[in-house]
Amino acid sequence: HGAPFYVLGPLVTDIAPGYDHIGCAIGGAVAAAAGADFLCYVTPAEHLRLPTVEDVREGVIAARIAGHAADIVKGVPGAFEQDVAMAKARAQLDWEAQIKLSIDPEKARRYRLEGGVSKGRACTMCGEYCAIKVYQRARQRKFFGEGEE
């Protein structure tokens, strides 16, 4: 009939009160990849209480992530390129580019600042064991020869 198809959810599991926005994003990504035209957000407060402004924000972001994932699957122009740009920024440890390219720059910046900055350009998660830094050192050794860093 040509009418747009709208889904509320679909919620893929009922065992995650407080995380229904994640269950809904999973279902929404699958539904949109299969052809759903519109996704509805669900908040973490779904089935528990009235949502706060922050709950709504989290739900909308989860739905945006689901939509973006579906756009990649469907080959929507520009969707995959966004992820490639992020992958390049990560490979270069370019934090400003990563924050700018993120779906929620405010949260990305806040988390980066709250975690402090480790020695060097890596994040505080892996420190000296950062896969990117290890890879860069290995490439440098291969290019310049053993011990010439």
Image (cartoon, rainbow, N blue to C red):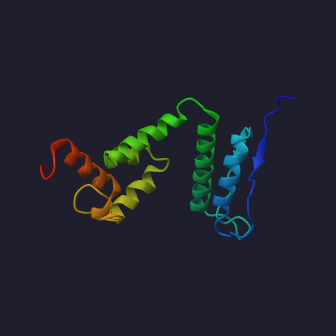
Closer-to-camera residue (43/14): 14
Q: Residue furthest left?
A: 148
Tell me which residue sits at (56%, 29%) in the image: 77
Q: Is residue 7 left or right of residue 20?
A: right
Closer-to-camera residue (117/56): 117
Residue 52, picture quadrant: bottom right
Q: Is residue 51 left or right of residue 104?
A: right
Closer-to-camera residue (143/55): 143
Closer-to-camera residue (53/47): 47
Quadrant location of the N terminus?
A: top right
Residue 48 in the image: state x and y as whole percent.
71, 71
Q: Is residue 71 left or right of residue 3?
A: left
Residue 45 in the image: state x and y as whole percent.
67, 66
Residue 69, picture quadrant: top right
Tell me which residue sits at (31%, 46%) in the image: 94
Residue 125 in the image: state x and y as whole percent.
36, 64
Q: How many marks?
A: 0
Residue 70 in the image: state x and y as whole percent.
64, 42
Tell me which residue sits at (74%, 53%) in the image: 9
